Amino acid sequence: MNASGLITRRGVVGGAVLAGLGGTALAQGFAGLSESAEGFAPVVPGRTFAFPADHGPHPEFRIEWWYVTANLIDANGGAYGAQWTLFRQAIAAGGPREGWANQQIWMGHAAVTRQDIHRFAQAFARGGVGQAGVEAQPFHAWIDAWEMRGLDPVSDENIAPLELKASGADFSYTLRLGALRPLVLQGDGGYSRKSLREQASYYYSQPHYTAKGILTVDDRPVDVTGMAWLDREWSSQPLASDQSGWDWLSLHFNSGDKLMLYRMRQADGQHYGSGKWIAPDGTAEQLASADIMMTPLIFTEIEKRKIPTTWRIAIPRMALSIECSPLNARSWMGTSFPYWEGPISFAGSHTGLGYLEMTGY
């Protein structure tokens, strides 16, 4: 296929994604995630997770993602961030159709960040033709040449070891991810509420990855090591009609603890929060909305939007009070549905590294 044909096909697929998510999506919640989920499976409490099956796709639900972030350093202590995400979006309910009639749309995002640069790329694919997908066993998630692939032997409970690959016009990376501890069910046994109403997702994480590999920017490869975090979520309507987006953090403490936090921004200012504190031995404690205080401190103007890029986080019950600062305040993902995402460091009562994602601004 010639270049113009490829662009045309990707334009059609990208248009299908936009149509599937709704032309007025941003006014109704980030990426249309607050729209009606009629015909799709509901998220209800009490699900029993089963692995490796739940590492694979759930086409009866409307949306789903496989999302990895990595905090990395080179041999000289230079800091980097890497991100890899595969999204699945059903544009119509019902059983999967064959070939180009398949109603699953796939979208990939990848990025590399350091203090002076932020590079990103995106890719689109239609389901049913082999261009993108996820297989639970042996684990393999891909879109074009980007992939997250299980390395033999893969532990179903750890979803490790994995090889992660992505590339854009001016960056690429290949990382090997390992984990000795099992994944963590977020929320109440994997049932993660997003509001005081029925909005929820099924959600688990693997926060214990170690990472090692090669990261290339502008044809200059560097060896990197560090820590990585996998999030897996699927749902049919994770946002309420009065929620515009979320602010999410994954934190690696120097003590070995881990922390996931998010707040769903509501129009009335009564934002809904949740989190999970994960001890070094893997035991976890759920945090309620009332436990969490997230206060933006410094804003960065990007594309005429004011983005809160420095935060104060306090959880008095856990004696936590920290200030989170970005490695690069301009870590803007200028993709079809733009958002801010990048590596951070934090200090105060606790110190460490992590990732911040903010949608719907």
Image (cartoon, rainbow, N blue to C red):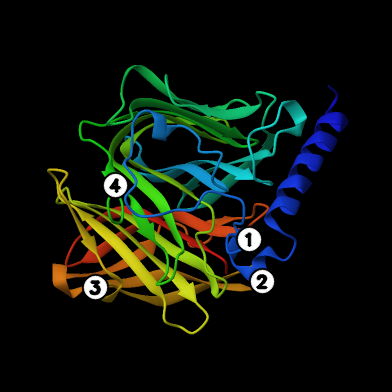
The quarter of the image holding the C terminus is: bottom right
Residue at the extreme bottom? 268
Residue for badge 1: 32
Residue name at image x 41 percent, y 33 percent: 55
Position of residue 334 measured from the top left corner of the image (x, y, whole percent): 64, 55
Position of residue 217 measured from the top left corner of the image (x, y, whole percent): 54, 37
- N-terminal of the pair, mark 2 or mark 1, is 2
Label 2 SS? helix
Residue name at image x 62 percent, y 29 percent: 132
Residue for badge 3: 291
- N-terminal of the pair, mark 2 or mark 3, is 2
Q: Closest to the observer: 99 or 97?
A: 97
Q: Closest to the observer: 224 or 71?
A: 71
Q: CA distance from mark 1 to mark 4?
A: 26 Å
Residue for badge 4: 185
Packing grade of label 1 (10 A; few <14, some 14-19, many >=20) is many
